[in-house]
Amino acid sequence: MGTDMAAPGQPRCASYDAIVIGAGIQGSFAAYHLAQRRKDTLLLEQFFLPHSRGSSHGQSRITRSAYPQEHYAHMMPHSFRLWQQLEDEAGTPLYRRTGLVVLGPPGDPKLEGCRRNMGPDNVLDAVTLEQRFPGLRPRPNEVALWDGSGGVLLADRALRAVQDAFRRRGGTVRDGEKVLRIDPGAVITVTTTAGLYRAPRLIVAAGAWTNAVVAPLGLHLPLQPLRIDVCYWREKEPGSGGSVTPCFMATGLPYAPHGIYGLPALEYPGLVKVCYHHGSPTDPEERDRTPPGSPRPHVALLSNFISSYLPGLESQPAVLESCLYTNTPDEDFILDRHPKYSNIIIGAGFSGHGFKLAPVVGQLLCELSLGEEPSHCMAPFAISRFPGVLRAAL
Ligand SMILES: Cc1cc2nc3c(=O)[nH]c(=O)nc-3n(C[C@H](O)[C@H](O)[C@H](O)COP(=O)(O)OP(=O)(O)OC[C@H]3O[C@@H](n4cnc5c(N)ncnc54)[C@H](O)[C@@H]3O)c2cc1C
Ligand SMILES: O=C(O)[C@@H]1CCCCN1
């Protein structure tokens, strides 16, 4: 689609109603919502799809209603509905319900935030927890909350499903095309490695590369890309049930201040995914340059956790992969207009918890770009919470 103005042999040149930069889960959902509103939309991706260089690859992500922050807890019912719609449309399962346990000492702010938002009836007593999940051994003083809606989103499949749904609505995906330049204006011009595109509205959802994309527009957001060790742990005795776990989040651990989370075996038979909710600062272009044999403090910390909470698993990971978080200082998302160019919308800083909310994030980015009243309160996501981010463009 798009109004093509290319002469033969010349770079592509076309006009659209909207352009989205970044075909991760957030940009793909934003494009899908725009196409659903019958906007002729171009989705640009620097790598050939599918790829594993960003934040949205892999087979699994946790979804849950349990959230310590009220604003996310309020968005989750909407998100579950939109995931269900996509699943119905795709005709393939995108979500596996497993339930989710939140573990932590009484008084821990995250645990108590979840307890408050979930209501008082969700505490799981120790006997029931042990009956259901004998492989999971919390400390005697810990509280376990049960979120029956929790489960696993089949991430790669979900990403493909939303991109397919976008295409079916007439959307255009151009992968292997890196955005090199953005010229703002009432009509924005986006120059890529292969062409030149124009549209009256632009959404930037470039993950860990967001600052590289928006810095030439004078915007320097406090975004920190982190390289995350994604670890999978094998059962000591295959078939012993050590890998039968719910999804879980453990908080209030003195040696793991950012918390540890886990998902039952899915991508590799008998291997449970258990990760630290933090990583090492990195540049997305350099993340594989860790010298061989360099220490992995987060793996050591996870081994410690596994030995006491999941003793049916081996205490060294069987598979080690990596992924990128892009963190804001408060770990809330950035969903807002560019402070100077109001037809440029930015979705970034998903801080390791954005996948489950992507259908709502995509809708909010779409609404902002169309000048509509957003479906949720946007105050927690405003750029203005970070003073001094707008500087003179280069
Ligand atoms: C290990 C790990 C576990 C996680 N677990 C959970 C979980 O359990 N639950 C949950 O809800 N969330 C989870 N998350 C977070 C979630 O996966 C991310 O919040 C989400 O994937 C971010 O998506 P994104 O679209 O912003 O980024 P990305 O997927 O990185 O997409 C950005 C895209 O922009 C493209 N791009 C960048 N620059 C350009 C350019 N100049 N031109 C063209 N394209 C460009 C990139 O190539 C990339 O494809 C996890 C993340 C990780 C890494
Ligand atoms: O968003 C989630 O649900 C997971 C687990 C908890 C930490 C962040 N990532």
Image: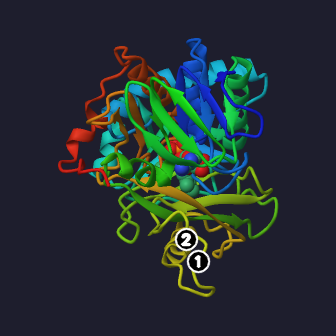
Q: Does the CB distance between marks 1 and 2 fall below 8 Å?
A: yes
With 231 as the anchor, is 139 left or right in this view? Answer: left
Give the colour scheme shown: rainbow
Percent position (x, y) of residue 107?
Answer: 26, 51
Image quarter where the N terminus lies is: top right
Quadrant in the rendering for residue 225: bottom left
Does residue 205 appear in the picture of this structure?
A: yes
Residue 25 x/y as whole percent: 58, 38
Q: Amino acid at mark 1?
A: Arg
Q: Mark 1: which secondary structure? A: loop
Pick out the residue farthest to the top: 38
Residue found at the far bottom of this picture: 293
Q: Residue at x 59, y 24 (%)?
A: 41
Residue at coordinates 68% horizontally, 58% vertically from top-left?
272
Numbered label attached to residue 286 = 2
The image position of residue 379, as x and y in percent, is 25, 31
Is the CB of the residue bearing disc 1 within 8 angstroms of ligand 1? Answer: no
- Looking at the rendered structure, the number of numbered marks drawn on it comes to 2
- Disc 1: which residue: 289
Q: Position of 390 compared to 17: left or right?
A: left
In percent of width and height, residue 358 lies at 52, 33
Look at the numbered disc 2 and give the secondary structure of its residue: loop
207 sits left or right of 184 in the view: right
Q: Amino acid at mark 2?
A: Glu
Q: Residues within 10 Å of mark 2 (few under 14, many from 20)?
A: few
